[in-house]
Image: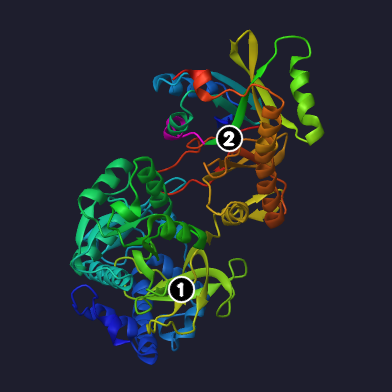
Amino acid sequence: MKIHQISVFLENRPGRLAGLCQTLAEAGVNLSTLTLAETGGFGLLRLITPDPEKTKEVVERAGYAATATEVVALQVPDRPGGLASILRELEPHGISVEYMYAFAMRKGGDAVMVFRFDNMDRALTVLQAAGVNVFKPVELFGA
Amino acid sequence: MIRNLWNDLDGTFFPESALDYMPVDRLREVQLQRLKAVTALAYDRVPLFRERMDGKGVKPPDLRRLEDVRRLPFSSKNDLRDTYPYGMVAVPMREVVRLHASSGTTGKPIVVGYTTDDMAVWTQVMMRTLYAAGYGRGDVVQNMFGYGLFTGGLGLHGGLEALGATVIPMSGGNSERQIMVMKDFGVTAVCSTPSYFIHLIEVAGKLGIDFKRDLKVKRGVFGAEPWTDQMRQYIEIASGIKAYDIYGLSEIVGPGVAAECMCQNGLHVFEDHFLIEIVDPESLAPVPDGGEGELVITTLSKQALPLIRYRTRDITALEARPCACGRTLRRIRRISRRSDDMFIIRGINVYPSQIETALLKTEANLPHYQIVLTRRSGLDQMEVRVEVTGEMMRDRLSEMEGLQRRFAHSIEQITGLHTDVTLAQPGTIPRSEGKAQRLLDKRKEGN
């Protein structure tokens, strides 16, 4: 099951990230995980929160440019070769990873990682057929 | 086209507007007669004009045809600045009933004065301006031009009141309150600078107010800064109103020099009061009809501050062909730039409007932008800062970098200059509540 990630545009300037975090804190938005992708002049902060719709609304109202993207959260076995075992499933289907990052929490002793693939629907079918655990929002954030 | 003489709201006839349809021969007669009178007034009462005319060996009686205006000397903003405050006033100060001043970007402002008759003419041209855009009795008009020394606020105000509209004297600023008034007072028409109105559309959106659904605004007149057809399209689509261009400058009268009619295809100049020429800004030679050049105006009926061949610095073109509305007044094309807005970078002349055109090639809705000029180790650099909007936002860095490159590429195609394009967070480029600050020239700050 796909989940929504909110990406926010940030300039590479002192205080810009702190400002956004302050905005989210004031709105009571809990960050489940996040990653910052950056280039010379700017960065994209990708956020996973229990309520992405509200998160997008909060940051947009505060004047940020934001967009929602579909990603999946997968259970990755916490042993050498755990991530490789998942990626191997996708390779024959020509699906590649655009980016990925980890959740701070663990599930059943395994790591939880967020993936964005170039072909999300295809990737989901392949992963589910291979028995990879794809988390539902309720499993990640509770009811 | 008699229909145009009637107010569509309550059928009131505006005799002032009949002047817009004067037969051309009669119009030229009036112009010549008034040109002779104003030249005589300027020669007799304003030392600067007398000296210049004497210097060119031309005297008021030498004017026999309208074309003879070309024998007269030019005047400019510098003349008003040099004779600050009252050096070019042609009547005793006791005859002056109103003063305005234009904010000078450098040093002292320039001061303009009006006699009682001048005020009547100003009110008349403002009524004709507003009438051409469909304003009338029954309209509730929010006037967001600044009240005070700036001619915009009080100029529109006088015309609106004389027309019988209900006028709300708001001035600019306090955007949230502007939206509240617009909604609660049932505003049907607005007057504003285009950039401020675009800002208000953004503010309304943030407040969750839909212009088309929640407000009754049907039309607006916009002026006091150069704007583009794309900005008009944006205003009309985003807010659902009809946006009309108006033109004027404090030195000549304030707003009320020229105005668009319902055809929205160029601005009719109130030629019975203003004689226009288009000249090449470099050579000062006349430009044939339809060609682009600087607008030069001679005031035909001003008493307190007659100006002969005043160089406006506004770049436009004359459209002499008749307009579908039936007005006999000739039109000027929308003024999209000023010859003095031009900046020179690495020897190339650039107009901010060129940057705007380049940005619009990449992004259909004009993003907020600012041109920043700096000097690094003796070399001029141009940076264009563009605010990222929700529509431009993508989740992939490569797409955002691609957008940046496309902006830089189209700027280079249009200006021939390599430019650094910086993507900025929304709201980080300063917005003046009045005129847009498109250009920040930091080259003079040391380095």
Q: Is residue B230 visible?
A: yes
Q: Along the line of sight, which residue is nearer the eye, B108 or B376?
A: B376
Disc marking residue B265: 1
Q: Residue B341, position in %: x, y?
A: 54, 54
Q: Determine whether A8 is above or below B70 in the image.
A: above
Please say if the residues under marks 2 and 1 sit with CB atoms less than 8 Å apart.
no
**Element marked by disc 1:** loop
The magenta region covers: A58-65
**Element marked by disc 2:** strand
The label nearer to you, 2 versus 1, is: 2
A107 left or right, relative to B256: right
- Disc 2 marks a residue whose amino acid type is Thr
Q: Is residue B57 visible?
A: no
Q: CA distance from mark 2 to mark 1?
A: 44 Å
Q: How many marks?
A: 2
Q: Residue B2, position in %: x, y?
A: 29, 87
Q: Residue A143, position in %: x, y?
A: 44, 20
